[in-house]
Image (spheres, rainbow, N blue to C red):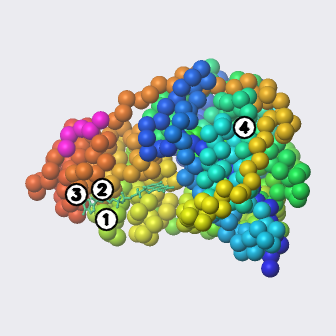
Amino acid sequence: MEETLKIVVLVKHVPDAQFDRHITGPGNTTDRDESILSELDEYALEAALQLAEERGGPKAGNEVIALSMGPSGAVNAVKKSLQIGAYSGVHLSDDALAGSDAAATSLALAAAIRHISADGRPVDLVLTGMASTDGETSLIPAQLAERLSFPQVTFASSLEVTGGQVSARRDAGAFSETVEAQLPAVVSVTDQINEPRYPNFKGILAAKKKKIASLSLADIGVDASQVGLAGSWTVVESAEARPPRTAGTIITDDGDAGIKLVDFLAAQKLL
Amino acid sequence: MANALVFIDNPGAALKKSSLELLTIARSLGETAVAFTGELNDDVAATLGAYGATTVYQPSVDDLDNYLVGPKAAYLAAAVAASGATAVLVDNSPEGKEIAGRLGIKLNAGVITDVVGVEADGTAHKSVLAGSYNTTAKATTPVTVLSVKANNVEPAPSGDATAPATAKVEVPADGLANSARIASRTEKPASGRPDLSEARIVVAGGRGVDGDFGPLEELADALGAAVGASRAATDAGWIGHDAQVGQTGVTVSPQLYISAGISGAIQQKAGMQTSKVIVAINKDAESPVFEIADYGIIGDLFKVLPQATAEIKKRKG
Ligand SMILES: Cc1cc2nc3c(=O)[nH]c(=O)nc-3n(C[C@H](O)[C@H](O)[C@H](O)COP(=O)(O)OP(=O)(O)OC[C@H]3O[C@@H](n4cnc5c(N)ncnc54)[C@H](O)[C@@H]3O)c2cc1C
């Protein structure tokens, strides 16, 4: 059997994209009421669970730790991850973190991962989704890797770990690639990698017994001035809701809709 | 000393339109330098000069492409130091954004992604939450790193072309350490159509095409358009995953987006709703795509598209 792994999965609590989302407050930050576990993180969690299960699961000494940074409500993303199957959870929360940009977020997450590494065995793998479904910058995996001096393997559409090395396939623009890196590494995965499992009744019951550790900035040795709006390197100066797109002309095809379409394109000077 | 540094990664024989756009934006920020990788041929050097680049930097090592992102970010950081630039512009590809991200950490510099416009003082415009907000953002740090989306400025040469100076930049050794290595790489077959993320017109198909992208390809070719797809169509294997438009695919913002046989799920809309004009063809009048279409046709795409293609060919003669 393969060596056991200690895996941290980053899970973000984000506003549900099925509803209208809002930017509010002096820092122009996203309103986090009605938030859910970021859909794209479920693929990372599934990948982590599969890697751990191939190695005998928790009994064999594997760890799958769901880590979320965010206000009190963000603990729900950790709880959902535990219901899906993560073995334990960590919630990093501190008022000073509010409004952190990617740079400040990656600083806090890197410190939390170092803390988790110092607590027992070092972390082998940090798994993330390809992007959050709110900020959508995809910056965190790269910035975290830079801060931890770990190699990054991003946009993995398949993943294998053997002999202390990760190997992944990715689709990068004009190329398909296989990439390899030594552990410890940061890996982000796409929605092509697997089919995430749903929490079942047993999982929901089992989650109640699983441990969620709460961390504050003091616990991870980060000063309030390094994070939040104060520690961010970018400011959002203004945010304006775009008028929602409205429906235009709608016609039913009576046999000549293709010609009418061309008339429309010509009128719009799009031909 | 340059004000703006544009990263141009392996352009091959000619610069991409998106690189010309970056150079055009850079000029509005002040004196422009270029951090270049790959072979710099004479034509490309001349174009860089025509677009106002005064210095073209090249890396001291030529195997940056064998690693994932890390060494390129290290090279770019060294080029920022050499040029003294305070604004760095990279393209908005996934790789461009990651290089921007790592560069930001190396330089203690704020990074803004998905930028659609830059003001002379470095203020950046971008839209967030799947196009539902327009925001302005600014870095508070001495250096600003911006990844800029394609298709938001008209590329324009500077008028007084110069031959740019070239200079080598030493790539720090630590750039290669701790980076993932590319073990193998295969180039995907080219379609001959415009690049999806840069195309002026996109014709996209979904589950409704039922395995046959032929009518879409013919319309695309009549319009000089790129072909896109919904995830249902790429998951079914009817077309490559690179054609996927949406939250987990490519984000497009063309002049015209023609959606055929696509229902318009939120994840699909996320990738296309900043298109200037949206046309939707769908059999089902209740499809959510009609809520955002400027011109909607309730009908069968297998009838509507071929008729439109024939009509376009007729009018173009
Ligand atoms: C994490 C995640 C990420 C996702 N990312 C993306 C993404 O990036 N991009 C994306 O597209 N989706 C994405 N999806 C999937 C998305 O939710 C939808 O499932 C998908 O977009 C549906 O594709 P569709 O509209 O082609 O198919 P359907 O929803 O099945 O719609 C097909 C439509 O075709 C119409 N139709 C059928 N036959 C014809 C005909 N002959 N003529 C005209 N109309 C016809 C039908 O009326 C119907 O409206 C994602 C989902 C998840 C969970």
Where does residue B236 sit, x and y in percent of width and height?
Answer: 42, 69
Q: What residue is rendered at 43% in x and 37% in y? A: A20
Density class for disc 4 (Cα within 10 Å; few <14, some 14-19, many ≥20) is many
Mark 3 near mark 1, Cβ–Cβ under 8 Å? no
Some atom of ligand 1 lies within 8 Å of the CB belonging to the residue at label 2: yes
**Residue A13 seen anywhere in this rendered image of the structure:** yes
Disc 1 and disc 2 in contact, CB within 8 angstroms:
yes
- Of circles 4 and 1, the one toward us is 4
- Distance between mark 4 and mark 1 Cα atoms: 48 Å
Q: Quadrant of residue B131?
A: top left
The residue wearing badge 1 is: B209
Residue underneath mark 3: B283
Q: Which residues make up the magenta segment? A: A246-250
Q: Residue pushed farthest bottom?
A: A1
Subunit of label 3: B
Q: Look at the picture and state if B91 lies above or below A210.
A: above
Indicate if the residue with disc 3 has its beta carbon within 8 Å of ligand 1.
Answer: yes
Which residue type carries mark 4?
Ser
Whether residue A187 can be seen here: no
Mark 4 Cβ and ligand 1 under 8 Å apart:
no
Kindly state the secondary structure of the residue where label 1 is placed: helix
Q: Is residue A268 above or below residue B27?
A: below
Q: Chain of mark 4?
A: A
Quadrant (top left, top right, bottom left, bottom right) of the C terminus of chain A: top left
**Is residue A222 found left or right of A43 in the rendered image?**
right
The numbered mark, 3 or 1, whose residue comes first in the sequence reads 1
| Left or right of residue A144: residue A270 | left
Check if residue B254 falls in the magenta segment.
no
Task: Tell me: is circle 1 under 8 Å from ligand 1.
Answer: yes
Q: Nearer the viewer, residue B222 or B114?
A: B114
Circles 2, 3 touching at the beta carbon (< 8 Å): no
**Residue that mark 4 sits on:** A93
